[in-house]
Amino acid sequence: MRTPRPAAWLGALALAVLLPATTPVVAETSVTIMRTIDTDRYDPHRSTARSTAEALFMVGDTLVALDPDLKSVHPLLAKSWTVSDDGKLYTFKLRDDVTFCSGKKFTAKDVKASIDRWLDPATKGVVKNRAGDVKEIRAVDDYTVEYELTQPYSELLFQMTQHFHTIINADEVAALGEDFGVKGFDGTGPYCFVSWEPRNELILKKHEAYKWGPAFYANKGPAKVDKLIWKIIPEDNNRVAGIQANQGDATQYIPYWAVDQLEANPQISVTKAPSYFWTYFVGFKITREIADNIEVRKALNLAVDQKAIAEGPFFGKAEPAYAYIHPDVLDYDKKDINTSLFGYDPEKAKAILEAAGWKMGDDGFRHKDGKKLKLVAYSFTNIWQQIMEAMQGDMRKVGADLEIQVFDATVIWGKLKTQDFDLFTMSYPYVSAGDAMNLYFPSENRPTPNRVNWADDNTDKWLSEGRAALTPEARYEAYAKVQKQVHDAVVWIPLVHEPMFVAAGPRLKPIAAHGIYGAGLYKGLGIELK
Amino acid sequence: MLQHIAHRLLISIPVLIGVLLVGFLLLQVVPTDPATVVAGPTATHVEIEAIREAMGLNEPIYVQFGIYLTRVLQGDLGRSMISNSPVVTELANTVGPTIELMLASLIWAVPLGIVLGTLAAVRRGRMSDRIIMAVSVAGVSMPIFWFGLMLIQYVGFHWQLFPFQGRGGPLWTLSGLDHIVLPALTLGGVFIGPVARMTRTSLLEVLGSDFVRTARAKGVSERRVVVSHALRNSLIPVVTLIGLQIGFLLGGAVVTETLFAWPGVGRLAVGAITSADYALAQGAILVLALSFLLVNLLVDVLYAVLDPRVRAR
């Protein structure tokens, strides 16, 4: 037998030292998502912004999840639930295998702490009506929660799918104080908060332990990418070029003019959410002279060509709206809403104005009792400018003078609190007819968000009945009455129902778009490299 | 020289106080309501009121300004209404990228502008002069956002030569260098035209002066006459122009930073204004104004360096 030579020993030693370094290392996968604006803070109880929801759905979970059809509710952190006969007590059985990103075990105490924090006046929480009239939240044991209301809330489960109901780690909230949702966020979602540079980027990493994704996702967890970067790219052209040049991987903020271009690119996939409820409308301030006249409101509604607006500013991608809410939404009143009130019929509009005493003057506008048919509209910028210019032309054709005052997004919210306008522009997300009606038509919500100044005892009563309904049928009946009443009063000019597109770049597989609260990527479990 | 600098610094103090006042008042007269922005579109008026109270927006304006001024004098610019971070920290994070971008723009645009202007002056009336001047006029007339969009569309997207989203890191890294090329080309591109035109005009004037004629009569080579004698003397109005243009460059930086998602002060200012973040917007305006003052001060000092007559005054 030959003794190995010293050189061979040295060679073997060198190989042993080098081997670990040459073992294949799996590179971290990183995906960049582009969006237009950032949020104020990632706090579910203090921000209603869509950009807050986009990230919170990923870094946190709710007890229940909303199906892409926006009508079915699925278990998420709650395995199951029961509702008492009087509709006041919801008992949730929670999963026992859930952990926060920090590693802390999720229990019923976290559910109680989350809702209690939202409702605590010290939190200065927003849209607390979405929690229902809470009497008490009880952690019966580690995995059972009782959610007790003072009166039934028929839409509670739908509301519980929204980001306001995200379950947070109360210990971390206390530790971070005012920096909660700014410097840190500990949730149970498929991604974990790493860092946030406001107005620039938010970095998330994969939650390794995650395995409790909603049933409608093929991947229940963990996420398929290691790192997500939410990057603010305000400029439209930059996003469109960026996704095609692999500088950004996904976005739902596709300008309408670019949808066809991206769809035509074989390397880009563009998906459309099966259901998405985000409606554009113009509201009348019905306590103002002229706008208080229902005949004027009817005529101006018939003067506006929704189809042309959908074809023009929205490049044919939006759906013309002939009701305040989308016909596919839960509890939409197909039977009683008179959509013909909102169609395009300028001749009929002229006839209504004539009959109402508004006679055409030499200046090309109508007058009555020495008063010109002139309305002032407060409008947002961007696409709204084009919409309002189209509307101005439409109204001019029937003899109405529309003065448009455009305000930047920072200014308009303050302007809309005043009573100095006849018309205002708005677009909004909703999950059900009740959600929409309860936002815009309770008299207590004047002057915002009930900017039309709608005040009616019956409406308030029916909204209460709808909220307190114990069966879907009773809920529908109550909300149907409200829908018929406010549609018959033509207090809005419905314009278009916006679509939701999600584009995925050359590196990614197509991402199924979800319509919840305008957050197209929802949990982010569908993001996967090719 | 020191007296000259001290004099300029003293003049800057009331200007700075004026800037603070105007910056504060401008944001007050705009009917922006930060509380409604923070509360969001679906918030009720009760919720908006609660947020306004918490943000101290119900105090009289003069009280708000008094508090702001006292804090600024103590070096405290407050905290961002949104991120809750100290404004100074937010500004410190963004000043660097803006300075980086401006230097990267100036470092190629100024020498190129001077070279082109000199060439045009030396070849006055020839085809090369006409081409340079035509390009300069185009450069002066070109909107910065359009030039940036063209660079994104062709250099970034079609040819995929350079990235066009954000900052890639410090300038000494390859990624950092890569990412700054297109923003610096955009911002610097609009700078070349004015510099070239001013250099040409000024140089032509100097080339016609007595000392240049004397130099030529003494047999000094034309290259030396232009480069060593005439060019230096023609640079004073060019330096003035550069100083003035840097003010516009700061404005251009706002557009360029937004276009390329560059995390600088300009973009911070736009973001702060659009999100009604008063404290941060005031801080950003202060930094931009300070930069403008500082540049003007530097120009004054440069005058003295370039022209002994200024030192003597």
Image (cartoon, rainbow, N blue to C red):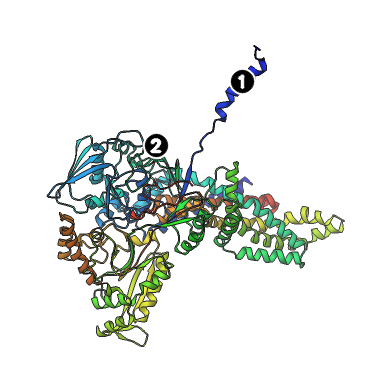
Q: Provide residue A136's location: percent of width, then percent of height.
A: 17, 43
Both marks 2 and 1 on one chain: yes
Q: What element carries label 1?
A: helix
Q: Is residue A78 visible?
A: yes
Most foreground residue, A247 or A169: A247
Determine the image quadrant of residue A211. top left
Q: Which residue corresponds to mark 2?
A: A208
Q: Which residue corresponds to mark 1?
A: A12
Most foreground residue, A68 or B123: A68
Q: In the rendered view, tell whether residue A29 sits above or below residue B194.
A: above
Q: Provide residue A316's location: percent of width, then percent of height.
A: 42, 68
Name the mark nearer the viewer: 2 or 1.
1
- Are there few (<14), some (14-19), or many (20+) residues within 10 Å of tag 2? some
Which chain is mark 2 on?
Answer: A
Q: How many labels does the image show?
A: 2
Q: In the rendered view, tell whether residue A98 sits above or below residue A530.
A: above
Q: Provide residue A137's location: percent of width, then percent of height.
A: 19, 42
Q: Can residue B285 be seen in this view?
A: no
Q: What residue type is labelled 2?
A: Glu
Residue drawn 16% across the image and 55% down it: A471
